[in-house]
Amino acid sequence: MQLVIDSANIEAVKELSQYLPIDGVTTNPSIIVKEKKEFLSLLREIRHVIGEEKELFVQTISEKAEDIVQEAHYICNTISGNLLVKVPVTIEGIKAIRMLKEDGIRTLGTTVYTPMSALLAAKAGAEYVAPYVNRIDNLTGTGRNVVSDIVQIFKANNLPCKVLAASFKNVQQIQDVFLADVDGITASPELIKEIFNHPSVERDVKKFREEWLEQYGIESNSLISTI
């Protein structure tokens, strides 16, 4: 199971990487623009924070396959480390994924709304596909079911492509796709924090501490230092 941060905010990436077992960072043009920084410098900052081994996903903005390929090569030649290029699953995108596979460049097929578009991306050579769970829910489908269908199709056809679910509004959607046997999720820093943010936990921890202090009158670390 992979847990990936969907953000280009340096401070958020630093914070989550410090505490949680993060596997990488996904970005897209909207996320990059939001930070109002020079994009290559920003990507290099993210790489510095997460290290060379963790996966960094960078999306192309070109529309024609040949332009996508050229852009992908530029990204890979400019940003170091374990990098994947995100390519939208348009017909030109599928062509570009095939071309990049031949060039040895790893890709993620993004903007996935149907199992069949995921299948085409996988057959073209994408290493990952990213179904948009909440956006599917907001249309006429059910995001969890689409994810589950993609997983089953990949297994039935022995496709090595991984399913990295994206676009979430709440923790329940994340839990649902994990139950659908997804390979991983990418979510905003705020939503990742919500995964373990339960009021009962803080209440219980506070009660444990209060009872300890009532009995012993000192912090546990102070007690240990006297032993």
Image: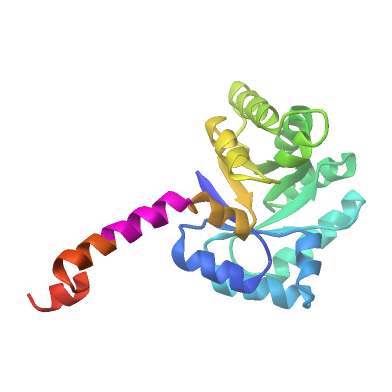
Does residue 202 belong to the magenta stretch?
Answer: yes
- Please state if 95 lies on the left or on the right of 170 as rendered: right
- What residue is shown at x 34% (from left), y 60% (from top)? 206
- Does any portion of residue 132 appear in the rendered image? no
The magenta region covers 198-208
- Please state if 209 lies on the left or on the right of 8 as rendered: left
Q: Quadrant of residue 212?
A: bottom left
Identify the main secondary structure in magenta. helix
Q: Position of residue 2 (x, y in %)?
A: 53, 48
Q: Quadrant of residue 136?
A: top right
In front: 189, or 84?
Answer: 189
| Outermost residue toward the right in this view | 64
Does residue 207 belong to the magenta stretch?
Answer: yes
| Outermost residue toward the front in this view | 214
In front: 174, or 226?
Answer: 226
Q: Is residue 5 above or below residue 213?
A: above
Q: Position of residue 55 (x, y in %)?
A: 58, 58
Q: Position of residue 119 (x, y in %)?
A: 73, 30
- Does any portion of residue 43 appear in the rendered image? yes
Q: Is residue 123 above or below residue 72?
A: above
- Please state if 206 lies on the left or on the right of 7 as rendered: left
- Please state if 61 lies on the left or on the right of 40 as rendered: right
Q: Is residue 21 above or below residue 121?
A: below
- What residue is shown at x 58% (from left), y 25% (from top)? 155
